[in-house]
Amino acid sequence: MTGPDNPGPAADASRAEVLIDVRGVSYSIDGRIVFDGLDLTVRRGRITGIMGPSGTGKTTLLRLMTAQIPPDRGQLRVWGRDLATLTAAEVFAMRKRMGMLFQNGALLTDLDVFENVAFPLREHTDLPEPLLRTLVLTKLQAVGLRGAADLAPAELSGGMARRVALARAIVMDPELLIYDEPFVGLDPISRGMIVRLIRQMNEALGITSVVVSHDVPELAMIAHDSYLLSGGRVVAAGTPQELRDSSLAVVRQFMEGSAEGPVPFHYPAPDYLQALLSVEDP
Amino acid sequence: MSAALPDAHLARSVRKLGAVAVFFYRLLAQCVPALARPRLVVSQIYNAGARSLVIIMLSGLFVGMVLALQGFDLLQRFGSEDALGTATALALLKELSPVITALLFAGRAGTSLTSEIGLMRATDQLTAMEMMAVDPMRYVAAPRFLGGVIAMPLLATVFSIIGLFGGQLVGVQLMGVDRGSFWSQMQNAVGLKDVMEGVVKSAVFGIACSLIAVYEGYHAEPTAAGVGLATTRTVVASSVLILLLDYVLTACFI
């Protein structure tokens, strides 16, 4: 287990090839600091979990890693390339090697389930229709939704939409898969299936995965490396077990789900009693 | 302070104009690749054009009928009822067809385009495309823009034909204008230049309306209120721009 000044997996980066390297990244939105000197490393062939309370900028970090937004300061390197130096065409070429699962699925509403999964193949390959169909049905079978191939996105539940989105994310056989809150709102069966899929794709195909989540038990089951973000920095890093055994107050608060601790549960507000007493009679 | 406010407003307006111009350039650059996928463009012509047909035909019929009524009332004061066909045709072809079709297009197809693209933005569909290395400008914006640009002159033509039919219905069938005079005078007086004026106007309005609709949708704030505001902006900006361009184009043709 390591503290904020020594992000563990990063320090051991030499043990495995670094795929994503975040160094001293700062980012703010409308003057509000989201990240202040963030350091983080994702290693090839491993599952890296990024945890943190809501509003800590986990999704923003994914957007930075995928060159959707540029940082104010610092450097992000993916596959050894500095994202700031890439042209738009190079960013697109890099994204062809990635798959991303969005929190809400982000399925294209004017296409049915089959065409949603086939979309990247149709755009980037000239595969013959029978082969394309086989590939799409294989991926849909993997997420248990081959029977839903003809349904429209509007006919799917939230969990089903997420599974279709996962099938779409893996259809191009990416080297890197990025999951944004993959377990939120799923029933236990779907949740277990997604956990197994993430692990299987990592073990069988060696796909590097970045999983952003605040579902500690699920992440603990699959992540090799974990980072806990708070206050715009990495406050703890290590294996899930190391995080669980941590004595740091902020880590304990997050792992135990306590309202009391360094991470405030309440949004900053004037004194509660004063606010109640100042309410005038109708 | 009082001078700073108009300055800030002016700067904002100029910035937005610049942003629209850059967006238009990017859109045009993606139109050729988008045409390589004709299925997408055809489906947008269907959405913007075929689905607007009923409202265009109904409006065209009533506008033609009203034109004939008003025209007959005016012309009979000078004993020139026979010129009703010419008056109806010129008013429709040169002015009312392109303008009213464009206004209806902005209200029906333009709002639909803006809200559809805005909702795609709000539900991360455009971001998902970017993450799949697909440029939404090529896949979403350009086909919709082209669909609108192609559909608009076609709709204006339908409006004119139905309007002429409505004018004939009232002028000839109801008010008793001679059928031969109605059509022959129209044939003699209406030239290719008059028809071209309508065609050019509807093409320009089609570009303006589709550009505004796609731009506003693409840049809508990704919230329910943001999409609503963008849709309103589409109708307001399109309507004002149509009338402004109409004046400019009319002045050019005279």
Image: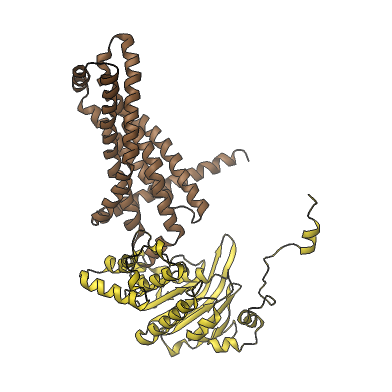
> x, y (%) of residue A48?
47, 81
The answer to which of A151 and B198 lies nearer the viewer is A151
> Could you tell whether B167 is left or right of B128 in the image?
left
Q: Quadrant of residue A246?
A: bottom right
Q: Quadrant of residue A251?
A: bottom right
> x, y (%) of residue B3?
59, 38
The answer to which of B50 and B147 lies nearer the viewer is B50
> x, y (%) of residue B59?
35, 33
| Quadrant occupied by the N terminus of chain A | bottom right
The answer to which of A93 and A273 lies nearer the viewer is A273
> Could you tell whether A163 is left or right of A72 in the image?
left
Q: Is residue A1 visible?
A: no
| Residue at the spot 40% in from the left edge and 81% down from the top edge | A197
What count of labels does the image hold?
Answer: 0
| Residue at the spot 47% in from the left edge and 48% down from the top edge | B230
> Could you tell whether B88 is left or right of A108 in the image?
left
Provide the letter of the chain coloured yellow. A
> x, y (%) of residue A256?
63, 82
The answer to which of B94 and B179 lies nearer the viewer is B179
| Residue at the spot 29% in from the left edge and 29% down from the top edge | B163
Chain B's shade in the image?
Answer: brown
Residue B187 vertical placement versus A104 (above, below): above
Residue A90 vertical placement versus B160 (above, below): below
